[in-house]
Image: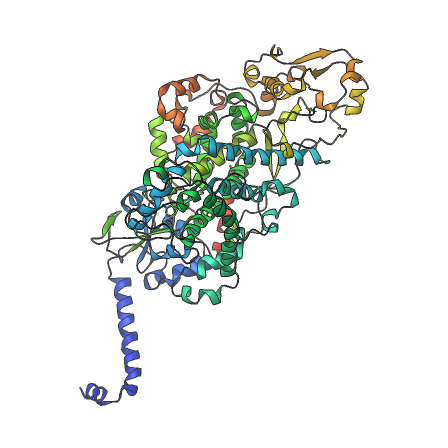
């Protein structure tokens, strides 16, 4: 007892070491209790250090990847070669990998963890960064209708999307016309940059107004780094290291307090992004102020179908009657811009990467597009695209496997706690889940690493259940508000691309690394114009194609470069009469219609090689060329060459009877959901699936559930290479 008396009698300065000692002992005892005897102690830990300190998870976050590390932990923990649904990743944090866990936490709308504060801009919270559900739902009410399926499929948004995708198609057309090495094929195109430009152009026109957003797509020729070259600050946030720095140092306790000093470029690029947005906002706000504003009543706002920013500008808080100040508006809109800016390009690049490395998928997809859609882009409505089952399957499968930035999501268990997979989680526990893991549950998605669109070809109810388990857009009240917009963009791009181009991944041996993991390689893709190719001959050179895509005058496709080919007589030879038969368009204004008829795939599938009487083409005798020797006016119809069905079979293999006609998925989307009539129509179509569904394609559906091939447990040093392995498996199919 003597030492206690001596402590009490000593001066406060002398007490300090004792106090420090006691604090350490108490801290250690507390950590030991939490780690070994606390309520989470019965949950297997990713590593013994994780039970003691949250820095273990931060270490993984910074040096490796929570996606692969947590995924492997979930697989490793289970004794039955399946996945363990819950794993402890910190003293107070668990990772879950089960649909049931997601329902418990996300379905019930547990609050976000304070980590999300990093997404505030201009010093103001926004819908995404606010942790309180109340603040979130009042903000979401303002513009949820602008992002609804009705709005996205409406004229305003559709015309924005279509015109921007048309710019990409024209860019590809110019690329393939000017490539002197491969006739009708583009050189390497860094697709992610193209899609970044697309997303920025679509979103800014969507959020502000046509003509008041960015215009990157018209500057793609400036080079692969167009987006960065144009100095758009926002993109800077997606510059690999800068983003890593920004998100890590500014979001994680205790670093966020000193993050500004630790991260060299992150905060700077955030500031730059904010300045960039201000530049866009200024003229838009000025115009809105000077025009008749929408009614600032709740009803008026809901009915208004214009830009999201306009809604924010005239919104008044119903309780206080106060409008949002400009920093609040800017914070909100910047967040929406950032939210889609990485995810959409990443998803599109991934889908193109997969279709390029899975030729049978690409062939099926193309057949469905060619047999179901008109060739002229202006004749295709999104409603038509939205009903295609194989296109939908390819996109769903791509979105299932893609690893987008919106990955590590965390929620806090509320008062009263909850039970997940038989484990009690007390209030305050942080629950983390990632689409990367949830979308790879082997009992839901057999053979989860395989890119297999056919797994989505299911009867309606089964399809819905499967889709509910896919978590790419998260779930519950705080799921992605941009879902419909992004799906519309992705579907339009994929349909417009594959109806016209065959894609090949260049240098497919190179490993895909995710940009935020230090990517040094973004997919380079070659686009080969298949509509220009018939029976080994390139029509491209002989035909001044009427553009298949609606474009504004200044965007008209440039004159194709004339070139001779080993496959065909040169144009000059043809003009001098070496070819016996030529066809010309009588009325050039009808070129578009001619082109549509020319490749009418309904007659393709029926094997009908008779020219359609509606065409404006007519046969001309040799010698008549001089009257019409403009390449712009010359068309070679498909019936002169190999029949379309024969051509398709030659390229894609013989037609096979369907093994699973009844498994055709029912179409998604507004049309399909409304009633059975349209669905029936679609089911009656000569479907690609009937021709090409094979035993091999549906094999994964038959695999016994709950099995997964075990992954090699990586040492920490090897985790860096994990994406290679995952990618290898994906691409090996
Ligand atoms: C493939 C594309 C996309 C994917 C995979 C995706 C994914 C997600 C996910 C997983 C969340 C929830 C994140 C969390 O709770 O931590 C989310 C939220 C959000 N997303 Fe997306 N997103 C995509 C495209 C877009 C687009 C194009 C926009 C808008 C232009 C957008 C705007 C938002 C917003 C505003 C939120 C916050 C919603 C809220 O807090 O209620 N997203 N997104």
Report x, y in % for residue 473. 39, 42
Closer-to-camera residue (584/24): 584
Answer left or right for 437 relative to 729.
Answer: left
The reply to whether residue 313 is visible in this rendering is yes
Report x, y in % for residue 246. 47, 58
Closer-to-camera residue (52/460): 460
Question: In what quadrant does ligand 1 lie?
Answer: top left
Report x, y in % for residue 374. 54, 22
In terms of image quadrants, where is residue 681?
Answer: top left
Give the answer, above or below, for where 570 lies relative to 197.
Answer: above
Give the answer, above or below, for where 645 lies relative to 81.
Answer: above
The reply to whether residue 83 is visible in this rendering is no
Closer-to-camera residue (95/128): 128
Report x, y in % for residue 680. 40, 18
Image quarter where the N terminus lies is: bottom left
Give the answer, above or below, for where 355 lies relative to 324.
Answer: above
Give the answer, above or below, for where 706 lies relative to 72.
Answer: above
Answer left or right for 104 relative to 271.
Answer: left
In terms of image quadrants, where is residue 311?
Answer: top left
Display colour scheme: rainbow
């Amino acid at each position: 007892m003597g030492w206690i008396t001596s402590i009490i009698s000593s001066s406060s300065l002398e007490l300090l070491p004792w106090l420090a000692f006691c604090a350490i002992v108490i801290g250690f005892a507390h950590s030991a209790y939490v780690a070994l005897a606390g309520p989470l102690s019965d949950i297997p830990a990713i590593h013994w250090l994780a039970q003691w300190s949250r820095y273990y998870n931060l270490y993984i976050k910074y040096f490796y990847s929570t996606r692969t590390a947590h995924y492997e932990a979930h697989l490793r923990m289970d004794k039955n070669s399946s996945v363990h649904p819950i794993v402890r990743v910190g003293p107070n944090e668990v990772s879950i990998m089960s649909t049931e866990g997601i329902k418990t936490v996300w379905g019930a709308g547990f609050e976000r963890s304070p980590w999300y504060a990093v997404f505030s801009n201009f010093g103001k919270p926004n819908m995404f960064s606010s942790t309180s559900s109340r603040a979130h739902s009042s903000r979401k009410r303002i513009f949820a209708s602008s992002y609804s399926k009705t709005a996205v499929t409406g004229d305003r948004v559709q015309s924005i999307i279509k015109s921007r995708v048309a710019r990409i198609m024209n860019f590809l057309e110019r690329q393939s016309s000017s490539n002197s090495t491969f006739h009708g094929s583009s050189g390497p195109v860094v697709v992610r940059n193209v899609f970044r430009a697309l997303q920025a152009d679509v979103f800014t026109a969507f959020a502000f107004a046509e003509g008041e957003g960015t215009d990157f797509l018209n500057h793609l020729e400036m080079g692969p780094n167009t987006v960065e070259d144009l100095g758009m600050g926002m993109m800077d946030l997606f510059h690999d290291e800068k983003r890593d720095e920004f998100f890590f140092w500014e979001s994680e306790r205790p670093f966020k307090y000193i993050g500004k000093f630790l991260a060299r470029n992150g905060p700077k690029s955030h500031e730059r992004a904010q300045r960039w947005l201000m530049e866009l906002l200024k003229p838009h706000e000025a115009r809105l102020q000077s025009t008749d504003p929408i009614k600032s009543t709740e009803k008026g706002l809901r009915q208004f179908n214009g830009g999201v920013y306009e809604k924010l500008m005239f919104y008044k808080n119903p309780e206080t009657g106060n409008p949002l100040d400009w920093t609040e508006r800017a914070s909100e809109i910047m967040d929406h811009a950032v939210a889609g800016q990485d995810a959409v390009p990443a998803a599109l690049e991934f889908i193109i990467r997969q279709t390029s490395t899975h030729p049978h998928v690409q062939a099926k997809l193309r057949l469905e597009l060619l047999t179901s859609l008109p060739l002229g882009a202006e004749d295709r409505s999104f409603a038509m695209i939205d009903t295609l089952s194989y296109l939908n399957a390819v996109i769903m499968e791509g979105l299932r496997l893609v690893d987008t930035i919106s990955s590590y999501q965390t929620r806090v268990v509320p008062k009263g706690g909850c039970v997940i997979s038989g484990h009690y989680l007390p209030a305050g526990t942080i629950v983390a889940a990632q689409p990367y893991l949830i979308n790879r549950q082997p009992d839901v998605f057999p053979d989860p690493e395989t890119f297999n669109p056919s797994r989505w070809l299911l009867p309606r109810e089964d399809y819905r259940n499967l889709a509910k388990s896919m978590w790419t857009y998260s779930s519950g009240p705080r799921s992605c508000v941009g879902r419909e917009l992004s799906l519309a963009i992705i579907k339009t791009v994929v349909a417009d691309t594959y109806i016209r181009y065959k894609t090949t991944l260049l240098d497919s041996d190179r490993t895909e690394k995710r940009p935020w993991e230090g990517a040094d390689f973004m997919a380079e893709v070659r686009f080969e114009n298949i509509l220009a190719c018939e029976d080994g001959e390139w029509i491209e050179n002989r035909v001044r194609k009427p553009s298949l895509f609606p474009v504004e005058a200044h965007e008209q496709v440039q004159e194709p470069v004339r070139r001779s080919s080993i496959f065909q007589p040169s144009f000059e030879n043809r003009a001098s009469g070496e070819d016996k038969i030529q066809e010309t368009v009588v009325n050039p204004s009808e070129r578009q219609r001619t082109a549509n008829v020319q490749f009418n795939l309904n007659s393709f599938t029926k094997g009908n090689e008779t020219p359609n009487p509606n065409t404006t083409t007519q046969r001309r005798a040799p010698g008549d060329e001089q009257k019409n020797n403009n390449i712009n006016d010359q068309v070679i119809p498909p019936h002169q060459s190999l029949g379309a069905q024969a051509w398709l079979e030659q390229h894609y293999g013989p037609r096979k009877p369907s093994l699973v006609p009844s498994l055709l998925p029912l179409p998604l989307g507004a049309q399909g959901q409304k009633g059975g009539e349209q669905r029936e129509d679609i089911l009656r179509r000569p479907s690609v699936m009937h021709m090409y569904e094979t035993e091999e394609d549906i094999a994964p559906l038959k695999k016994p559930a709950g099995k997964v091939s075990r992954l090699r447990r990586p040492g920490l040093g090897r985790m860096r290479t994990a994406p290679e392995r995952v990618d290898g498996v994906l691409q090996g199919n």
